[in-house]
Image: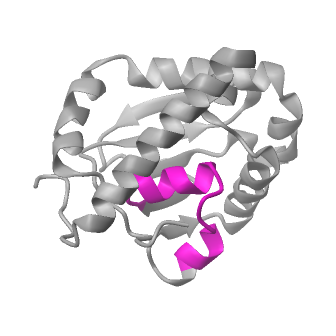
Amino acid sequence: MPGNTEARLPSVVRHLFPTFAGLPLGLLLTQSLRSLARREPRLFERLGEHRSARYFIDPTDLAFAFTVVPDGDRSVVRVVRKSETATSSVLIRGPLLTLLSLLDGTLDGDALFFSRVISISGRTEAVLALRNTIEDAELRPADLLGLRGHLARLVDAGVLGALNVARQISDRNPAREGPDA
């Protein structure tokens, strides 16, 4: 487990993200989520009625946020302004590396919530359904991309290795910089 549960993206990486935001990031993430739904429909079925909930994911160290509706093959991910929380059922906020650590199981969401590293508000039952689904999924980067075999192992090693490097750099930088730093 990383030493710094409040890991923030290094400044140089954060400054690259506006470039990525201009790409069809929402479309790419939507297609990835829909592809996962086709391959693993049980994950989305586990969400039950909360499949249609709108989850507002706010990486506090980025200048933008995401809305996610995990409705199986109708899933949608949008890159949005941080002010667009009004129509969301759930709001989840925290540093990007910490939020990604929830997905790959590196960090425990309950501990992060109670230590106030992440904040969660909105429909509690939708949050619990999402948390249980993510824990059950044990997702790897290659799963989200629909990759198998040798290529999947390479992608997993590369992405998880890059995240580890970013966490280590963040651990060495004790300053907590916001998105504009």
Quick check: can you spot residue 58?
no
- Decide whether residue 109 is among the magenta residues: yes
Secondary structure mainly formed by the magenta segment: helix
Residue at 63% of width from left, 68% of height from top?
108
Is 109 rendered above or below residue 157?
A: below
Q: Looking at the image, which residue is at 40% across and 71% down?
A: 4
Query: Which residue: 18% across, 63% down?
Result: 177
Please determine whether, in this image, residue 114 is positioned above or below residue 129.
below
Query: What is the span of residues highlighted in magenta in the rendered image?
Result: 94-113
Q: Quadrant of the N terminus?
A: bottom right
In the picture shown, does residue 38 fall above or below 118?
A: above
Q: Magenta includes 169?
A: no
Q: In this view of the protein, which residue sits in the foreground, 47 or 181? A: 181
Residue at 46% of width from left, 79% of height from top? 116
State the image coordinates of residue 26 (x, y, percent, origin top left). 44, 25
Q: Is residue 3 left or right of residue 71?
A: left
Position of 100 with respect to 170 (left or right) is right
Q: 128 or 54, which lies in front?
A: 128
